[in-house]
Amino acid sequence: MPYFLAYEQFNDLIHALNALGYRCLGPQVQDGAIVFDELTDAQQLPWGMRDTQKPGHYRLQKSELNEAFAWANGPQAIKPLLFKPKESLWRVERDATGAFTFKETLPENKPIALIGARACDLAAMAIQDKTLLQGKYIDQQYRWHREHLVVIAVNCSYSGGNCFCVSTKTGPKATSGYDLALTEIQNGFVVEVGSDKGRDLIDSLHCNEAEAAKIAAAAQRSIDAANMQTKRMPKDNSRALRDILMNNLDHPRWQEVAERCLSCGNCTAVCPTCFCHHQTEHPTVDGDGSVHAREWDSCFTEGHSAIHGQVVRDTTEKRYKQWLTHKLGTWWDQFDSSGCVGCGRCVTWCPVGIDLTEEMAAIAGESNVVADKKEKSA
Amino acid sequence: MSAIDTPVNTKIVARSEESGDIFTLTLQFTDTQEKNYAFQPGQFNMLYLFGVGEVPISILSHGEGDSLYAHTIRRVGRVTQGMSLLQVGDHLGLRGPFGRGWPLAKAEGKDVLIITGGLGCAPSVSIIHHILKHRAAFGRLIILQGVKHSDDLIFKKQYEQWAALPNVQVALAADSSKPNWPGHTGLITELLDQVNLDVNNTLCMMCGPEGMMRAAVKRLTQLHLPEEAIYLSLERNMECAIGHCGHCQFGGDFICKEGPVFSYPQVKALLNKKGF
């Protein structure tokens, strides 16, 4: 049975999480975008803020709505909290004989409770779990962060211009991966419980059960958000894209998109599933030790495919082809899913507004505009 | 402890210079717990130079019964430059073994054709050791090695020793050569016409520059060796060796995990495409 959390009780949620030892992160306006940062009071939430997103375009505006989650998303997903942009992997000490002692370094930060993750972000987290936790090898740092994370999802009541999670079947309503899922309605939130941790949390808040009208209002908000979407991934982001891409490696569109692409890597930085990273070395000043770390990398860099003096992907065309064929195609071979969750971030944050749904449409020969919205958008 | 996530300490017990820019370091674990370390021919280790970083290097020794692991390395980048300066008694970190090795079980009862180019001969040494150790389980062993210039040939003594063994054929090719070069002057693919393959009962394993491997596959299929009888070891940028860092992707395969050894039909579609 869902519960109702009134706006006045939102701080109780923050305090309850703090009491359990979690540092709360939540959405706030910073530098003209919604970002996740330390949240100590509901007043910090982006009340009334709404984002306008188009290819290569993100603007926040104050709307008339008295809501905290009237926006679609910002540049971050959950990824930077679990698969950190920089993280130490192991440390080595050299003794007087020159021999080494290696020690794995595990994170030491306080457990985090993330408030405001979207359905697409949770879908992306499930994909990263497959990459880093569920294969032959386990990423120990990711595992630590993952086991110490509480997710309070907030279902979308609005879709941005680049959202296409309906076609990728990853939203706009969260179906799994959360501890609690909130849907904002008048004066508060309908709350669904997704885990034992979430159950304990909601019990401690003494919320009332949500009555039928509130539950119906919440359901309608998800329907409204879904209906706002005008964009879609061709073939509904299915496995069919794999063969379409791999059978069209010589398609003229690759050269055409390469003429627009700056090979900057913004798309891979904001993508909530991109996992490429390179390893770096940080010797201590005294020369007796060193820290081996990793940092996010991008298939759009020259170094990504460099091997003893040669670069396998020496042109933007080859790099864009790697990105798209992997994300929408060969990801199926690796993880039995697409690598795309329809969040639209790579479209929004591309400085030249390249839209992967449009590129895929050009190659697949199927529209990236939702059928009954074609007139509207034309 | 496992040497998969975090390296373990090793000591250099032997060092030899193979050519101007190629050297071999033989390593021994210093921790007795590592006596359980075992690898399959064709697998590789990540070798760590203190304060500089790791590189993937294939393992030469046959790994059965001895606890010394030789790695032949070309001096090309920062890490390998540094490694080339190390001496006996110095230490290296080691993670491994990683990857899928050569299909030795499939090769049993068959002739084995080994085609290598340049430093590609290094990953083949462990196969040759394995076959020689289990000689009765395999048919004829044919070893073909190609180099750009006759001066580039390494392991010269070993080739001579192998050539002297019964049922082993060794043929060398150099694109250009000095006087008195005992091998063929020309392409390695031209050697294939001289070795008299039993195409119905041969398994081919190759490692070397992709251009050479593509040409060799072409000639072998013209000679009617089935595509399924051809295995190749591929190489891409590798930093983690556990399929997480993304650099070694070859289409849907992570070369560090699903490879480095692949059957030809598995990689055929992308082998001729630029950018993968």
Image (cartoon, grey):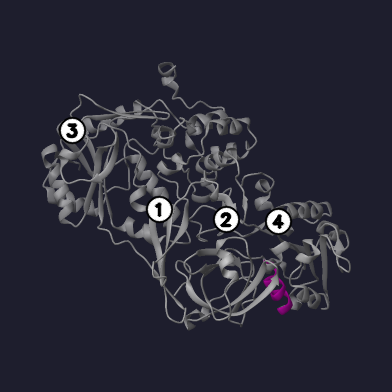
Q: Amino acid at mark 3?
A: Lys
Q: Do callouts 2 and 4 mark residues in contact (Cβ within 8 Å)?
A: no
Report crowding for label 2: few under 14, some 14 to 19, many 20 or more residues within 10 A (C-alpha): many
* Marks 1 and 3 on same chain: yes
Q: Quadrant of residue A346?
A: top left
Q: Nearer the viewer's eye, disc 1 or disc 4? A: 4
Q: Which residue is mark 1?
A: A129
Tag of residue B209 = 4
* Secondary structure of the residue carrying numbered label 1: helix
Chain-order first, disc 2 or disc 4:
4
Report crowding for label 3: few under 14, some 14 to 19, many 20 or more residues within 10 A (C-alpha): many
- Magenta segment, which residues? B123-133
Q: Chain of mark 3?
A: A
Residue A317 in the image, given as x and y percentages of width and height? 59, 37
Q: Amino acid at mark 4?
A: Pro
Q: Chain of mark 4?
A: B
Q: Do callouts 1 and 3 mark residues in contact (Cβ within 8 Å)?
A: no
Q: Nearer the viewer, residue B221 or A316?
A: A316
Q: Nearer the viewer's eye, disc 1 or disc 3? A: 1
Cα distance in 3D space between marks 1 and 3 = 34 Å
* Secondary structure of the residue carrying numbered label 2: loop
* Secondary structure of the residue carrying numbered label 3: helix
Report crowding for label 1: few under 14, some 14 to 19, many 20 or more residues within 10 A (C-alpha): some
Q: Which residue is mark 2?
A: B237
Cα distance in 3D space between marks 3 and 4 = 66 Å
* Marks 2 and 4 on same chain: yes
Q: Most extreme residue toward the front, as rendered?
A: A286
Q: Nearer the viewer's eye, disc 3 or disc 2? A: 2
Residue at the image position 32 percent from the left and 61 percent from the top: A107
Residue at the image position 57 percent from the left and 74 percent from the top: B86
